[in-house]
Image (cartoon, helix red, strand yellow):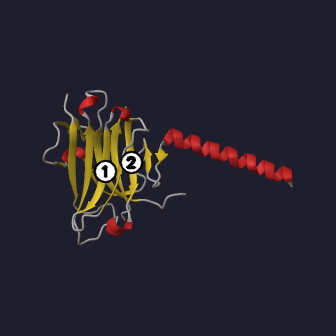
Amino acid sequence: MKGSVFCASIALALSLGSANQVLAQDGYRDQFLNWIAPTGPTGTVGWSSPASLCQLLPGSAPSIVDYATGGVTFAANSFGTIGLACPMQGTMNGVLPKDINQVALRFSNPTPAAGCAISVYFVDRFTGLNSGWASDKSHDLTGVWTANIWLNGSTSPATQHTYDVDVYLFRPQSAETSCNPVAFGMFMEAAPPPIL
């Protein structure tokens, strides 16, 4: 009996170790079970927009728009905040508004310890309620990543409301060229429930 419990414990420890290695290689979950990974959206895309087609908010820092990649980033030697507002005009791919449960952002944020940050919010323009995510300084997100963020129940789309996906890029003056966040595209998706 003790031998089989010991063997089961070893098997469990090995499987948890393997799972943690996969998470370390393929991304990470934050405290709200949002999934940040170098892969694309995790569900069926019901709406999408490249960052390059979003509205630049008044007062934004000077930016560079790359229509080939869809990317928006800081112009040379600029700093501050770039704000993008992307109106969600409806859903597609057979996804009903009531089934939308995640907002996703394709982005890059290398060397965040220098102070650069990126965030995304799904905003109900009728009520002002929002669900969102902001990067932190503990994860170097070099390359292209996707943040898949669960919506709270109060921001699940309703057909009579209007919605935006808002993205903010931040670079402090002290960072100069040591970090440079880039937004590439935004998605709304119907995703399977998270595995806890």
State the mark number for residue 155: none
Q: Give the amino acid type for the residue marked by disc 1 in the picture.
A: Val
Which residue lies at the image location 29% right of the left edge and 33% below the top edge?
Answer: 180
Image vertical order of residue 152 relative to residue 42, above or below: below
Among the two numbered marks 2 and 1 on one chain, the one whose residue lies closer to the N terminus: 1
SS category of the residue bearing label 2: strand
For discs 2 and 1, the disc positioned in front in the rendered view? 1
Which residue lies at the image location 26% right of the left edge and 46% below the top edge?
Answer: 168
Q: Would you say 113 lies left or right of 125 here?
A: right
Q: Would you say 51 lies left or right of 195 here?
A: left
Cβ–Cβ below 8 Å for labels 2 and 1?
Answer: yes
Image vertical order of residue 33 relative to residue 100, above or below: above
Q: Position of residue 183 (x, y in %)?
A: 28, 42
Q: Give the amino acid type for the residue marked by disc 2 in the picture.
A: Ala
Q: Where, by quadrant of the figure, is residue 160 drawn?
A: bottom left
SS category of the residue bearing label 1: strand
**Marks 2 and 1, how far apart at CA:** 9 Å
Quadrant containing the N terminus in the rendered view? bottom right
Return the residue nearer the eye: 104 or 47: 104
State the mark number for residue 147: 2
Q: Would you say 178 lies left or right of 39 here?
A: left
Quadrant containing the C terminus in the rendered view? bottom right
Q: Would you say 45 lies left or right of 55 here?
A: right
Image vertical order of residue 31 relative to residue 174, above or below: below
Q: Position of residue 140 (x, y in %)?
A: 41, 35
Q: Where, by quadrant of the figure, is residue 122 drawn?
A: bottom left
Residue density around tag 1, few if under 14, some if 14–19, many if 20 or more, within 10 Å: many
Q: Position of residue 35 (x, y in %)?
A: 45, 50
Disc 1 target residue: 120
Residue density around tag 2, few if under 14, some if 14–19, many if 20 or more, within 10 Å: many
Q: Where, by quadrant of the figure, is residue 127 drawn?
A: bottom left
Which residue lies at the image location 21% right of the left edge and 42% below the top edge?
Answer: 82
